[in-house]
Amino acid sequence: MAKNIIQFQKGLSLPKFLEKYGTEEQCYSALFHLRWPDGFVCPECGNKTYCEIKSRKAYQCHRCHQQTSLTSGTIFAATKVPLTKWFLAIYLLTQRKTSVSALQLKRGIGVSYNTAWKMKHKLMQVMLEREKGKKLSGRIEIDDAYIGGERPGKPGRGAAHKAPFIAVAETEGEEHRPQRMQLRTVSGFRSAEIERYAKTSLEVGSIVV
Ligand SMILES: [Zn+2]
């Protein structure tokens, strides 16, 4: 759940956004479907039948009677800020190309500066985590290098006490401008090792240069 965050389609206009996520009900429903895409599952015992405790926005398991709040275990937990404001904050932070300051966020969603600052940092953290897990795709450049070790070490590959790593860049356009980068430590530069990296971190169909 931590890496999952409500995502809005690119280019969603503000009126359309408000139409879809303008009320607490709508936001709760969206969060429910994000958290339990196949229906509620009790985190305690895995049972799927429950009753809803509307006043507390919680769900009580029919089998073990554990109560689970919709926001527990999410970044929205233990917050007094309504979900509509969280959603609007996510909308503002993700739909603009330029970065949004805490002050702009405060004005945009109508909370105190302190609250806006905290919300922004929580959301940025989650977005960063998500980005880390994303695979690179398209035209990829891979370079190998070593880090650390004694100097002057043995030159070239296999130098003692040095950690091998690869620097990987996803590039764009005719000038091959780097868009996103990954640095990964590897146990060596044998092709099997590089292949293992590619399988886990690159999209199928990427062109490796
Ligand atoms: Zn249960």
Image (tube, grey):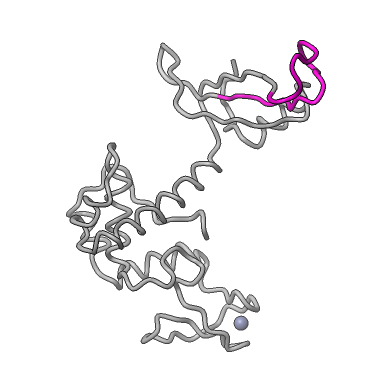
Q: Main secondary structure of the magenta part?
A: loop
Residue 70: image location, x then y, percent: 45, 73
Q: Nearer the viewer, residue 155 or 30?
A: 155
Task: Judge left or right: residue 88 versus residue 192.
Answer: left
Task: Judge left or right: residue 90 versus residue 205.
Answer: left
How many badges with numbers are in the image?
0
Q: Quadrant of residue 95?
A: top left
Residue 22: image location, x then y, percent: 23, 64
Q: Residue at x 72, y 32 (%)?
A: 196
Residue 173 higher or lower than 54, as above or below: above
Q: Residue at x 32, y 62 (%)?
A: 86
Quarter of image, ligand 1: bottom right
> Which residue is outermost to the front?
151
Q: Quadrant of residue 32?
A: bottom left
Q: Which residues are magenta?
A: 147-168
Q: Residue at x 74, y 17 (%)?
A: 151
Q: Quadrant of residue 5?
A: bottom left
Q: Is residue 164 magenta?
A: yes
Residue 65 higher or lower than 84, as above or below: below
Task: Judge left or right: residue 10 versus residue 193.
Answer: left
Q: Is residue 205 magenta?
A: no
Q: Residue at x 59, y 15 (%)?
A: 209
